[in-house]
Amino acid sequence: MLPLDQTIFDKVATHLLTQNARSFQHANGGICAYRGVGGTKCAIGALISDEHYTEDIEGLTLVWGDTVRGRIARAVSLSLGVEVLSPGVLRLLQDLQRLHDKNPPEKWRSLLLTTACRFELSPKVLFPLELYEDVVSIAKVNQDYVALSHYTRGELNRLNLFDDNERATHELVSLAIKELRHGPTQ
């Protein structure tokens, strides 16, 4: 079983990259919403189950100043099946909420990579599975970091997924080599 912070990151990253749109209360934009127009959900909204969602949480933030907003944190913790969210998980949730609320979808993949690195989480869900598997296969045959990086950078440039392909290359190659040494990551 994955640690809670990795589970949250994977679920939110997958949701945001699949939805590829911000969640707003109104069709013309405005205020971000946990549940928005057209069935969209923000980063935190993606973690709140239907059972624990109520419209009266709209407009509230997870954290206000130094105070954790109890209703939203409680809806998330109940939805995730945990009693209390740790301070580290709350920081991750804040980061993911800010990422959704303050940035356009075309920036999300790169910002999610930054978040994964900052919180020491695996960024595996950010890379196309086929590319990840190719890099691991090549690494099994040839563990030359320079050659592997060259191939990976070329593919990432071709796919145009990240703002910073150098950083993405480093993370993907490191992930592949780590998998070879320690077994598959989640």
Image (cartoon, rainbow, N blue to C red):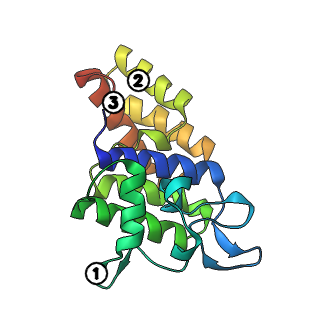
| Closer-to-camera residue (167/46) | 46
Residue at x-position 49% and y-position 24%? 134
Residue at the bottom extreme of this rendering: 65
| Residue 109 seen anywhere in this rendered image of the structure | no
Q: Element type at marker 2?
A: helix
The answer to whether the residue labelled 1 contacts the one labelled 3, judged by CB atoms less than 8 Å apart, is no
According to the image, label 2 marks what residue? 136
* Residue type at the position of mark 3: Thr
The span from disc 1 to disc 2 (Cα, nearest Å) is 44 Å
Give the quadrant of residue 34.
bottom right
Q: Earlier in the sequence, mark 1 or mark 2?
A: 1
Residue at x-position 49% and y-position 58%? 52
The answer to whether the residue labelled 1 contacts the one labelled 2, judged by CB atoms less than 8 Å apart, is no
Q: Earlier in the sequence, mark 1 or mark 3?
A: 1
| Closer-to-camera residue (74/31) | 74
| Residue 127 seen anywhere in this rendered image of the structure | yes
Q: Is residue 65 above or below residue 76?
A: below
Q: Residues within 10 Å of mark 1 (few under 14, many from 20)?
A: few
Residue 158: % across, % down:
62, 41
According to the image, label 1 marks what residue? 67
Q: Residues within 10 Å of mark 3 (few under 14, many from 20)?
A: few
* Residue type at the position of mark 1: Thr
* Residue type at the position of mark 2: Val
Q: Element type at marker 1?
A: strand
Residue 153: % across, % down:
48, 41
According to the image, label 3 marks what residue? 185
